[in-house]
Amino acid sequence: MTILKSKQTQHPASFRDPSGFLFTRKGLLYRQVNQKYAEEYALLMESGIYESLSKAGRLVAHQEVDIAPIQPEKAFKVLQPERLPFISYPYEWSFSQLKSAALTTLAIQKRALNAGMSLKDASAYNIQFHQGKAMLIDTLSFEFYKEGEPWVAYKQFCQHFLAPLALMAKKDIRLSQLLRVYIDGIPLDLASDLLPKSTKLNAGLMMHIHLHAKAQSKYANEDIQEEKTKKEISKDALLSMIESLRNTIKKLEWNPAGTEWGNYYEITNYSDTAFLHKKELISDWVAEKEPNEVWDLGGNNGVFSRLASEQDVFTVSFDIDPAAVEQNYRQVKEAKETNLLPLVLDLTNPSPALGWHNNERESFTERAPVDMVFALALIHHLAISNNVPLQQLADFFSDMGKWLIIEFVPKSDSQVKKLLQSRKDIFDEYTLEDFERVFESRFTIQKKVKINEAERHLYLMKKR
Amino acid sequence: MHYSPALYLDPGSGSILIQLTVAALLGAGLFIRTQWTKIKQMLGKDVPEANEEENIDDDFEE
């Protein structure tokens, strides 16, 4: 028994819903469905909801498997869901990613209602991006719909999706980071306070955020059983409410402009020759090492990430700039790319472990290592703008992956000169020789090529 | 009417009440629109039928 226990664990974020939970056994992911969910599961599978949604790539596909459940006294079935290569979180998504996740949730709810079911939660954490599409990953989110009842997840939907989207579109794109602080979504009174007054003229935001927040504070401690029993919400009215949320969200827009790196590749100091040479080297090295997953750190709008994803390598492209990530995601959507996941991440303060017991949402580094990491035109930002010593950079990158494609940008480079323009040069150790010496403590340098018409060198390194 | 007793999320009293209000408003709007359509149809105007089953990918994205 102890041996069995040591090889299986309940997923640390899967404990709220009594319908079942996720667990891993011998490295494989399973979902135990409990007896109390048996009838709802049957309707989900028989009503056609599961089939049409999973076929459209909007609900995680699963297989019923014949293995021992982890809590046999409660168990009804064990499912094996399709495993996703990477789990991302709403505070790592660009505006349009959160918007896609919101619209997907509403579209699923609409389909569920028409088939006699309803989403009992509307958590942004139940959505993942898989093969370029937003997808619901919680098979147990569907409950029976009883005509007349309101949507129990309405408050959660507004907190997880509508409030952050409205704040990002109408106030400041950086407010998406409030989702890091408020794990169950942005409190509506806070959203209502932060939003510009003009949003009260927007009927959708007025109803679903401002009045919603007022009603919450007014009825916070009241028993509303009496009012509830007097009124019902017809299915048509509920569908109109879903439609109203959808229209409100569809009208929210954010267009990247004037941020840090949005037009980086137009102002870069690379000549066409150097740019092409760099691309060619990266493509060749990816083809040679055949990694099964790449993380492009500081990936901007994904121009180099695509050198890997276009070779059928699943690639996550991280960047600090929400505008670059937005551009990248729009490109993924437009070209229906299936191997590329753009995400917002500040490497100098990456996503921490969050939630109950610090265990519900993994930190950035807990999701490492991967096969191959790109650090292109990145090291000078970390070493000079953020004062990270070379040894710490080498330690960090060696924790991230097995292979490293890294570009060294010397002090003589115009981009580095710009960084040093307004500050004292305290970086005696920032030389090509020191870089190689320090990184060799963690890696073996397998290739080193000077990029044509540039001051920069590109390296392929393997972790020791 | 009755509510499922085993809710695992707290839907929030205020959130339920605002839903009742919003749904009533939107429901009234919907009622007026459908009646209006009926009146127009009675007057012999050609009103296009709403397409019930839309393409599955249409409303997932923009």
Image (cartoon, coloured by chain):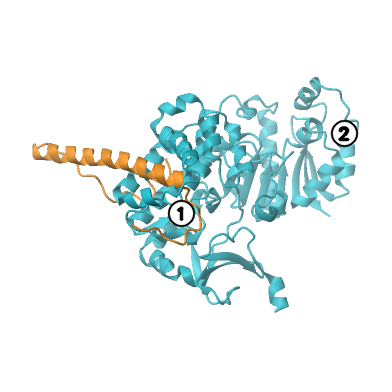
What residue is pinned by disc 1?
A58
Q: Is residue A50 above or below residue A162?
A: below
Q: Amino acid at mark 1?
A: Arg
Residue A295 coordinates in the image, percent (x, y): 67, 47
Task: Depth check: give the residue in front, A232 or A128.
Answer: A232
Residue A369 coordinates in the image, percent (x, y): 72, 54
What residue is pinned by disc 2?
A431
Q: Is residue A240 left or right of residue A58?
A: left
Residue A208 visible in image: yes
Task: Depth check: give the residue in front, A2 or A99.
Answer: A2
Q: Residues within 10 Å of mark 2 (few under 14, many from 20)?
A: some
Query: Of discs 2 and 1, which sits in the foreground?
Result: 1
Give how far apart the Cα atoms at labels 2 and 1 are: 49 Å
Is there a contact, CB below 8 Å, between mark 2 and mark 1? Answer: no
Q: Amino acid at mark 2?
A: Thr
Chain B drawn colour = orange
Q: Quadrant of residue A261?
A: top right
Judged from this view, the residue extending furthest toward the top is A422
